[in-house]
Image (spheres, rainbow, N blue to C red):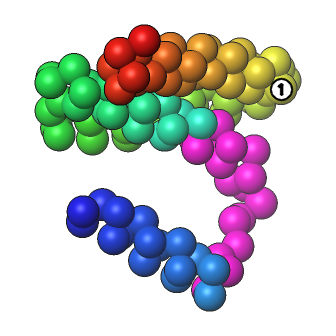
C-alpha cells in the first residue's frame, strides 16, 4: 500500500511541478524506463512465484537501469547508439513479455 501511495504522490507532484529533463540525459531516459519496467515485471513475477526478495529487487532495478544506460552511452560513443538502443529495447521487451506471460499464467491459471 505504501508503494501505491508513493506512486500516486509522485504522479501528482510530477503533474504540478512539471520537471524538465536535461538534454544530456534525454537519449538515455527511455531506455532507463524500459529497464525499470522490466525489473518491476520481474519483481511481480517473483512475488507471485513466492521467491520475492526486496534486496534482490532493488539491486536488479538499479543495475538494469544503469547497465542499459551504459550500453546506450557506449553505443553513442562508438557512433552506433541507435542500433544498441534498439537492441536493448528488443531484449528488455522480450523479458517484459516473458514475465507478463508468466504473470498471466499465474493469475488466470491459463
Give the position of the N terminus as an image quadrant.
bottom left
Viewer-proximal residue, 33 or 85?
Answer: 33
Q: Report whether 75 appears left or right of 36.
A: right
Q: Quadrant of residue 45?
A: top left
Residue at x 35%, y 15% (from the top left corner)? 109
Residue 51 in sight: yes
Vertical placement of residue 55 versus 81, above or below: below
Residue 5 picture location, percent across and down: 33, 71
Viewer-proximal residue, 23 or 95?
Answer: 95
Q: Quadrant of residue 107?
A: top left
Vertical placement of residue 100 versus 98, above or below: below
Tag 1: Cα neighbours inside 10 Å, few (<14), some, or many (≥20)? few
**71 falls in the magenta region:** no
Residue at x 67%, y 30% (from the top left corner)? 72
Q: Which residues are the magenta region?
A: 17-33
Which residue corresponds to mark 1?
82
Viewer-proximal residue, 14 or 84?
Answer: 14
Amino acid at each position: 500500500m505504501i508503494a501505491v501511495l508513493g506512486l500516486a504522490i509522485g504522479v501528482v507532484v510530477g503533474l504540478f511541478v512539471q520537471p524538465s529533463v536535461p538534454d544530456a540525459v534525454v537519449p538515455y531516459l527511455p531506455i532507463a524506463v524500459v529497464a525499470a519496467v522490466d525489473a518491476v515485471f520481474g519483481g511481480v513475477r517473483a512475488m507471485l512465484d513466492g521467491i520475492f526478495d526486496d534486496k534482490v529487487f532493488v539491486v536488479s532495478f538499479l543495475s538494469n537501469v544503469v547497465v542499459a544506460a551504459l550500453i546506450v552511452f557506449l553505443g553513442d560513443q562508438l557512433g552506433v547508439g541507435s542500433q544498441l538502443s534498439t537492441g536493448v529495447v528488443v531484449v528488455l521487451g522480450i523479458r517484459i513479455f516473458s514475465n507478463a506471460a508468466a504473470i498471466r499464467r499465474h493469475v488466470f491459471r491459463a
